Image (spheres, rainbow, N blue to C red):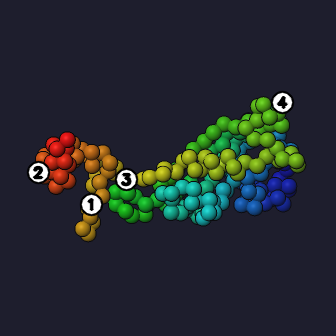
Amino acid sequence: MNNENTKTAGVTRDREGRIIHPASDELWLDPRSLRSGRTEVHIFPLLISKQELTAVPAAEGLENDTAQVTCIFKVLDDCIVCTMQVDSRVALIDEATLKLTYLDCSDWADLSLSKDPDMADVMPDERGRYDLKPTALALFFSSVPSRYSSNPEASYEGDGFEVISEDEYNRRLASSKKGENPFEQALGSKNSKK
């Protein structure tokens, strides 16, 4: 890929020689743009829609509504090896404080891009291009926790309520004495009749 084609396609290179794709490229890879025998690093923005974000119950939003997908491509004789990493900054409700907080999330995978269905993790479309978005979305979803707490062992008290972890609840339940729990008295008398 020469410098003129890179500029006209909206693709740029950073100081480290990584290829930066615009959002309009989505996550399609045309293998003809890769140089055989060389390792190339491509960075794609992954736009996450509000509908896609609903798959992660704890997520309230995403910084700039995008995640960053970094792909390291190595062209081999029979396939393209891709190491994909998805990084994002996700807004989550902290279960300990019930406040919105941002958490850095990341996950990665090694993929094989090939026409051979026996060895491919991703197959090309009819034009020979590889759609990497489904894999990037899967890595994004796996990187975001379904629940988040900055202090999972602590309790949080508010105006007339207290939020405690399941571990704290079980600890309190195990250490409670008869007479301290009004429900235990009812259960105790019910169990003694059996």
What is the spatial separation of the Cα atoms under label 2 and label 1, in whole angstroms?
21 Å
Residue 162: x %, y % from top left: 27, 60
Of label 2 and label 1, which has the lower sequence position?
A: 1
Confirm or deny contact between disc 2 and disc 1 (CB under 8 A): no
Q: Residue at x 84, y 60 (%)?
A: 8
Of label 3 and label 4, which has the lower sequence position?
A: 4
Q: Which residue is drawn at 70% across and 41% down?
A: 72
Residue position for label 3:
150
In the picture shown, does residue 147 fall above or below 60?
A: above
User: Which residue occupies the foreground of this view, 6 or 168?
Assistant: 168
Callout 1 amino acid: Glu
Instruction: Please tell me how crowded label 3 is: few (under 14), some (14-19), or many (20+) other residues with Cα within 10 Å.
Output: few
Callout 3 amino acid: Ser
What is the spatial separation of the Cα atoms under label 3 and label 4, in whole angstroms?
48 Å
Of label 2 and label 3, which has the lower sequence position?
A: 3
What is the spatial separation of the Cα atoms under label 3 and label 1, in whole angstroms?
16 Å
Q: Residue at x 83, y 31 (%)?
A: 78
Nearer the camera: disc 1 or disc 4: 1
Of label 1 and label 4, which has the lower sequence position?
A: 4
Residue position for label 4:
77
Residue 61: x %, y % from top left: 53, 63
Nearer the camera: disc 2 or disc 1: 2
Of label 3 and label 1, which has the lower sequence position?
A: 3
Q: Which residue ends up furthest to the right in the rendered image?
A: 127
Task: Specify whether 15 is left or right of 92.
Answer: right
The image's mark for residue 179 is 2
The image's mark for residue 162 is 1
Task: Specify whether 2 is left or right of 41.
Answer: right
Secondary structure beneath disc 2?
loop
